[in-house]
Amino acid sequence: MQKGFTLIQTVAIAGVFSAVSGWYGFMFGRESARKELGDLIDSLRRSNSSSSPPSSHS
């Protein structure tokens, strides 16, 4: 019975782990950025509507 991993198994496991962790990092980073951008837009809308009346666009 063989103990341990072969080089190919180790590289494959590292690749899968890297792909999964990269995907989760991308998804959580994207969600975080979306929330921050939404908060920024809301704060800009509040400050803009309280400081000046809305202008009409023709």
Image (tube, rainbow, N blue to C red):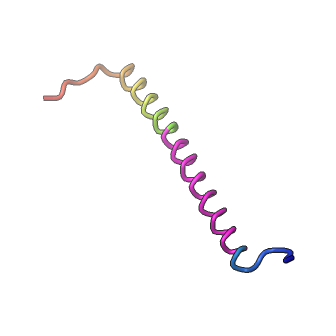
Looking at the rendered image, the quarter that the N terminus falls into is bottom right
Q: Residue at x 42, y 25 (%)?
A: 47
Residue 2, by quadrant, is: bottom right
Residue 6, by quadrant, is: bottom right
Residue pushed farthest front? 1
Looking at the rendered image, the quarter that the C terminus falls into is top left
Residue pushed farthest left? 58
Along the line of sight, the residue nearer the viewer: 33 or 20: 20
Q: Which residues are magenta?
A: 10-34
Residue 23, by quadrant, is: bottom right
On the rendered structure, is 22 left or right of 42?
A: right
Number of numbered callouts drawn: 0
Q: Residue at x 19, y 24 (%)?
A: 56
Q: Position of residue 26 (x, y in %)?
A: 55, 53
Q: Position of residue 33 (x, y in %)?
A: 51, 44
Along the line of sight, the residue nearer the viewer: 27 or 58: 27
Q: Residue at x 42, y 23 (%)?
A: 46
Q: Position of residue 24 (x, y in %)?
A: 59, 51
Q: Residue at x 47, y 35 (%)?
A: 40
